[in-house]
Image (spheres, grey):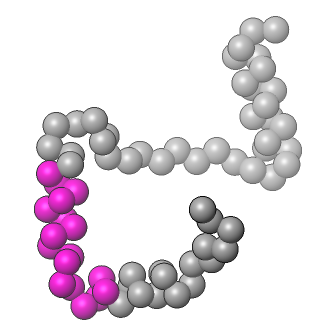
Amino acid sequence: MKIADRVQKHREKLRRAGLRPVQIWVPDARRPGFAEECRRQSLALQNDPHETEIMSWIEAVTDTEGWD
């Protein structure tokens, strides 16, 4: 059985289970300037009251039990 056939069979099994594929495009972290842009955006949010509120909420609702 070819790899493409096995992949197709696996995908069909997932679809029968009620799942569907989703493609997500994300920024390429290997691209020149990526780290600098991340830093720029992080610094821009450093003292933003909305960001502080959101991060506080995330910390309050995140279940970290069992994390090492």
- Left or right of 30? Residue 44 is left
In the image, residue 34 sits, relative to residue 59, either above or below, namely above
User: Residue 49 vs residue 32: left or right?
Assistant: right
Counting every numbered tag in the picture gives: 0
Q: Residue at x 75, y 9 (%)?
A: 2
Q: Nearer the viewer, residue 17 or 61?
A: 61
Q: Quadrant of residue 46?
A: bottom left
Looking at the image, residue 35 sits to the left or right of residue 60; the answer is left
Q: Position of residue 13 (x, y in %)?
A: 84, 37
SS majority, magenta: helix
Q: Which residues are magenta?
A: 36-52
Quadrant where the N terminus sits is top right
Residue in the picture at 32% in, 46% down:
27
**Residue beneath the point at 41% across and 87% down:** 56
Question: Which quarter of the figure has residue 44?
Answer: bottom left
Residue 39 covered by magenta stretch = yes
* x 48%, y 82%: residue: 59
Quarter of the image where one finds residue 5: top right
- Residue 48: percent from left, percent from top: 21, 85
- Specify the quadrant that holds the C terminus: bottom right
